[in-house]
Image (cartoon, rainbow, N blue to C red):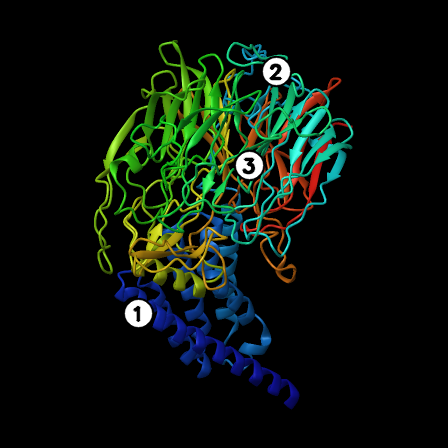
């Protein structure tokens, strides 16, 4: 008997200690939050918990009733802030729910004079909470559950002559459609997909590599060959039916940790025997070539038939992209995306190191002869005359806006579309002149044979947030309500705006409005030497999260870390999208990853729909005053997160995701969706969360794979079989969705992160879906080297 009393006493002591600690924590944090203008509920809850603890310690008969009231009051508060959003509700009362379960047990309550009615009240409160949570799982207020009713017609013949069974370019077409007319795999049988073959590249991240070593590959497929590149730019040719390697080319990449990126998103293909030759003489040594961008600043042409360098191209098969570069250094100019290839011209851009210094290479775009590799034209985005070739003693313009994302090409009109970023340093622009900003954050339409400007459109003015145009634009002809069909270009932005322009003229098809944006800082000192754009363009077609974030949108695993996130949020400068950077710290939302990244979208011209996987994750940008004349201490940055020096300007910058003390995003989920958009009405018809936190937690805390909606890097594809394929997410899955309504049809576990866009093709009438599972060094997914092909049994 004494032993039982001892157990109950110990249980009561432990319970009391936990209650007092929780009360003290919530009271201090709650008062702090009130002082910042935030919710008063945490302080009120602390007082209520303190009163319950006093009653509990005194063995008062009504103490359990008081706890039941706390439960119901907290539920009412949670619903008023979050509605029936499961993941938003959970941290508001998960701790109280567990404490309520504990109080139903005999050990902590044995010494109370009367407990049964109070326990019954607690039990009823817990049942109500459980019922609401079960309801909320199946009634997600963030999801849109419409259906695109327009049927899939018989796919039209591709005007560019792309064979239905092939995937000959990064976006299948150089217009970035990422849509295949194949129908063998469809909504009725996609759940039967099995692994057909796997291929291991053997290429892994080493200790000498950049933190952002990634596998962002989308292979290309021509005939019965797949061409792939690896993070260290090995170029492999594979049998598309079996996955067996046919040959490998090693470019002898020179890399080190200072490289900001080490990746290869894909390669390009040129067949002189099928190109109309009116500007150049076809190569006889190398009529079919694969064009490999190499991260140390080279472009290499490799014979597609045997894997040997094309000796009649450039200098023994190579073009030195560092030639005529100002401030050239290894890794400073870094081509990561496959070039556009026209019947006569190879057009390539590249990335430069973000936020390192004011003495960086140029972001010049160049056109080379497709057969011999000779430089035909340039478009230097920071030059008075962008087409002026550098002389014997001159170079390109340093720090001019670059084009790191894949380009797009309209073969019928011979126009290449260049998505540009901002001239680095990105986060402070007080020293930029009009020339440096004229073509920044824009789509620039050029004649692909001459590089002459046709039109351009700017998506962000005076960018201070790294809001590059981050993805290959998508080209398709859209049918207007009048019935008129117009050649359109869909321009994705990190802000979530999708600008839809006539791709011949650059005129808007979907309305664009210039809106006022924040001009002042609520906290901290004004930024020295800076100015802000008064307005920014907004498109009527947008996946931008609606409304401003408030402290109600902050999240955590429990109410304790959620409270910290709410306090952090209220201490930052934030007045909506385009809030200026600050020394105090600015919340950037959409964040540096943007709503859209390099993966792009899939457009189906036959059905006039688009499939996409937008994300939403806030970042914090904090300017750090420094001497602009200080000596540069480093070459290269090695990462896009953390401390970045910005030599030559009055600030460095620290950029990080907005995370809680335990490493979870401070903004409540979802952070990632899949969406279907009707391009005739420009409405989001359906939107679903995608992904779980299964692979984001230590195995010790592995949870059931509940859909939460996680960020993704990589794009989606779609098919005439009414199926959308996408991996990209932080959990290791390839998934298939119904393109009409977003219903999940199938998913396959990947051996590593799938931060790459898949492709689909057919050989001898058999359709395959292929995914690179190689992981992403800075995104935190598991690294690997596996290319996987799926097909029907």
Horizontal side of residue 28 vs 613, given as left or right: left
Q: Within 10 angstroms of label 3, few (less than 14), some, or many (20 or more) residues?
A: some
Question: In what quadrant of the picture does the C terminus appear?
Answer: top right
In space, the residues marked 2 and 3 are separated at their CA atoms by 22 Å
Give the x, y percent position of residue 403.
43, 34
Q: Position of residue 589 (x, y in %)?
A: 37, 47
Residues packed near mark 2 inside 10 Å, few (<14), some (14 to 19) or many (20 plus): many
Q: Which mark is residue 272?
A: 2
Q: Residue at x 54, y 51 (%)?
A: 778
Q: Which residue is mark 3?
A: 298
Mark before the other along the chain sequence, 1 or 3: 1
Q: Is residue 667 visible?
A: yes
Q: In 3D space, how far apart are the residues under numbered discs 1 and 3 (Cα atoms)?
A: 58 Å
Q: Quadrant of residue 504?
A: top left
Pair 1/3: label in front: 3
372 vs 245: above or below: above
x and y percentages locating residue 328 in the rendered image: 45, 44
Residue 94 drawn above or below residue 542: below
Label disc, if present, on residue 159 of the rendered structure: none
Work out whether residue 768 can be spotted: no
Q: Quadrant of residue 360?
A: top left
Residue 781 against residue 535 in the figure, above or below:
below
**Which element is circle 2 on?**
loop
The residue where tag 1 is placed is 31
């Amino acid at each position: 008997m004494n032993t039982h009393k001892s157990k109950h006493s110990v249980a009561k002591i432990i319970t009391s200690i936990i209650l007092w600690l929780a009360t003290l924590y919530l009271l201090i944090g709650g008062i702090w939050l009130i002082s910042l203008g935030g919710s008063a509920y945490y302080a009120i809850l602390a007082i209520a918990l303190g009163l319950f603890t006093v009653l509990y310690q005194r063995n008062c008969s009504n103490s359990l009733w008081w706890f039941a009231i706390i439960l119901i009051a907290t539920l009412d508060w949670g619903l008023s802030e979050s509605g029936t959003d499961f993941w938003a509700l959970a941290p508001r009362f998960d701790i109280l729910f567990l404490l309520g379960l504990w109080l139903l047990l005999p050990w902590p309550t044995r010494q109370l004079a009367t407990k049964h009615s109070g326990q019954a009240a607690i039990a009823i409160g817990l049942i109500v909470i459980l019922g609401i949570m079960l309801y909320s799982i199946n009634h997600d207020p963030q999801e849109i559950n419409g259906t695109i009713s327009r049927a899939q017609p018989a796919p039209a013949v591709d005007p560019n002559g792309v064979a239905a069974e092939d995937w000959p370019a990064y976006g299948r077409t150089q217009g970035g459609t990422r849509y295949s007319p194949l129908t063998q795999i469809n909504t009725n049988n996609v759940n039967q997909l099995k692994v057909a073959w796997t291929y291991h590249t053997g290429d892994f991240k080493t200790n000498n590599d950049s933190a952002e070593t990634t596998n962002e590959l989308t292979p290309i497929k021509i005939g019965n060959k797949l061409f792939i590149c690896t993070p260290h730019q090995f170029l492999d040719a594979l049998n598309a039916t079996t996955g067996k390697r046919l040959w490998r080319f090693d470019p002898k990449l020179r890399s080190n940790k200072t490289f900001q990126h080490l990746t290869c998103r894909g390669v390009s293909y040129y067949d002189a025997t099928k190109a109309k030759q009116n500007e150049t003489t076809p190569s006889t040594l190398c009529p079919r070539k694969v064009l490999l961008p190499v991260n140390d600043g080279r472009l290499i042409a490799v014979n597609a038939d045997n894997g040997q360098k094309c000796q009649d191209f450039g200098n023994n098969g190579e073009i030195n992209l560092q030639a005529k570069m100002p401030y050239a250094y290894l890794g400073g100019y870094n081509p990561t995306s496959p070039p556009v290839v026209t019947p006569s011209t190879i057009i390539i851009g590249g990335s430069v190191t973000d936020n390192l210094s004011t003495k960086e290479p140029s972001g010049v775009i160049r056109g080379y002869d497709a057969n011999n590799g000779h430089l035909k034209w340039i478009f230097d985005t920071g030059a008075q005359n962008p087409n002026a070739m550098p002389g014997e003693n001159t170079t390109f313009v340093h720090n001019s806006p670059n084009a790191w994302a894949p380009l797009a090409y309209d073969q019928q009109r011979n126009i290449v579309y260049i998505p540009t970023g901002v001239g680095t340093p990105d986060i402070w622009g007080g020293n930029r002149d009009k020339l440096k900003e004229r073509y920044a954050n824009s789509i620039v339409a050029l004649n692909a044979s001459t590089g002459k400007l046709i039109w351009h459109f700017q998506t962000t003015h005076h960018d201070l947030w790294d809001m590059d145009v981050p993805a290959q634009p998508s080209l398709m002809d859209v049918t207007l309500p009048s019935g008129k069909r117009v050649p359109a270009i869909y321009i994705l932005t990190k802000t979530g705006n999708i600008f839809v322009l006539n791709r011949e003229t650059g005129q808007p098809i979907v309305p664009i409005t210039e809106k006022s944006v924040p001009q002042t800082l609520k906290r901290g000192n004004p930024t020295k030497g800076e100015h802000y754009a008064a307005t920014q363009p907004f498109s009527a077609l947008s996946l931008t999260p609606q409304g401003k974030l408030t402290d109600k949108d902050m999240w955590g695993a429990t109410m304790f870390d959620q409270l910290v996130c709410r306090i952090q949020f209220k201490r930052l400068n934030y007045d909506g999208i385009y809030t200026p950077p600050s020394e105090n710290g600015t919340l950037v939302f959409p964040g540096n990853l943007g709503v859209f990244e390099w993966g792009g979208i899939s457009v189906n011209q036959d059905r006039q729909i688009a499939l996409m996987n937008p994300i939403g994750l806030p970042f914090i940008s904090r300017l750090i005053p420094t001497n602009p004349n200080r000596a540069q201490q480093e070459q290269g940055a090695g990462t896009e997160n953390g401390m970045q020096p910005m030599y030559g300007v009055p600030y460095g910058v620290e950029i990080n995701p907005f995370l809680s003390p335990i490493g979870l995003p401070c903004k409540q989920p979802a952070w990632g969706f899949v969406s279907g958009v009707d391009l005739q009405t420009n409405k989001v018809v359906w939107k679903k969360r995608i992904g779980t936190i299964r692979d984001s937690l230590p195995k010790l805390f592995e949870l059931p794979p509940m859909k939460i909606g996680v960020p993704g890097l990589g794009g989606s594809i779609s098919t005439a079989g009414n199926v959308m394929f996408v991996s990209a997410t932080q959990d290791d899955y390839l998934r298939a969705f119904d393109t009409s309504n977003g219903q999940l049809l199938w998913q396959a576990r990947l051996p590593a992160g799938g931060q790459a866009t898949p492709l689909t093709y057919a050989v001898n009438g058999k359709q395959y879906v292929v995914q690179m599972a190689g992981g992403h060094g800075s995104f935190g997914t598991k690294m690997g080297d596996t290319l996987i092909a799926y097909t029907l049994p």
